[in-house]
Amino acid sequence: MEGSGGMQLFSIGIDDKDLDLKDLIYKKSTVCWMEGLNIEENRIGNLIFLNYRIGHTCSPSKVAKLKERIKMIIADMLATIILEDLQSSLVQKIIQEEYFYFDKEDQDRILRDALAIMWGGKNPIVDSETIREQWQFRVWDRLMDHLSTNDELIFEGFIRFRLKDFMSELESAVDRAVDELLIENEYNEFIKLLQYFVEIQDPKVDEVHVVLQDDTRYVLLDSNLRVIHNEMLEQLAREISDKEISHDDLLISSLITIAPCKITIHEYDKIKNVELLNTINNVFSGKVIMSEERITPKK
């Protein structure tokens, strides 16, 4: 909406390539038009300035009151645009600058996870709404601070210089999302390797029952519920005293060595290491049964 004449109250400068931002500002400026303001555009270099003007003559006191009211409206509008409409594009820009070598699927995953991390979505004890409200107030307050002494705001410059902490948190969220992706990729490669080890050997027994003992050790039983005695397993067990191998790692190594066709994990709900259960499930996909039943080895 363009016009001329009257008095200019505020001006917002945006990059001339950022037409989406310009459209957003126009759409969200409805309240300003209701206050009798028009938006007039002019270009200086690679910036487009959106000039908020009042088209009629007012007394200085009315202009001051109107300016104060419009200042709050603009601060609220820009804070909402930054935190709701532009958050994805700000994160995408970080990804394209720092992690451009990831393929599109991974970049989309990083974007999704980074936003979840930023707003506490991956932490059940954090209230996402509270984080958003805190940032909304911080950004609004800094916009108000800027507009109290300036009638002009360069949008990109404001984000770069006045919202360094916000951008830093977005960058940290992206870094964390990348770390999680790399860890998951490494884990998946590890699972594939273990699956390969299982596939290349013949099953030593058809069925294995995994029983948790009181001291967090595991006992492996055959289909007759008798303890499996295997020279390789006994060698693995002896290595525990020589190396820092956990009982969980020993269990996985033992199951891979036996390569059974079926695994039943008894009293699985008492096993605290959920990652261990997931790993066994992934390596022996389709062969694992989780049971709450307690069984006792036969003599």
Image: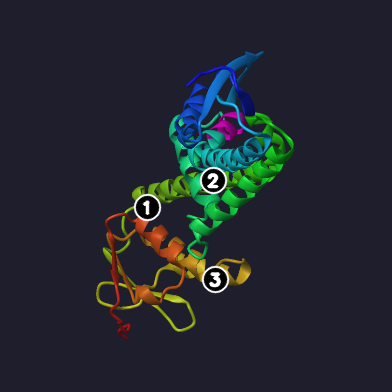
Give the labeled residue for mark 3. 238
Secondary structure found at label 1: helix
Look at the image and tell me whether residue 189 can be seen: yes
Look at the image and tell me whether residue 103 can be seen: no
Residue 227 is tagged as none
Q: CA distance from mark 2 to mark 1?
A: 31 Å
Residue located 43% across and 34% down the image: 105
- Reply yes or no: does residue 95 show up in magenta: yes
**Amino acid at the residue labelled 2:** Ala
Residue located 51% across and 65% down the image: 125
Secondary structure found at label 3: helix
Q: Image height check: is 63 above or below 198?
A: above
Q: Position of residue 69 (x, y in %)?
A: 59, 42
Q: How dense is the environment of label 1, judged by Cα within 10 Å: few (below 14), some, or many (20 and up)?
A: some
Q: Which callout, 2 or 3, points at the residue further toward the start of the chain?
A: 2
Residue 177 is tagged as 2
Range of residues picked out in magenta: 92-99
Check the image and name the residue furthest to the right.
Answer: 149
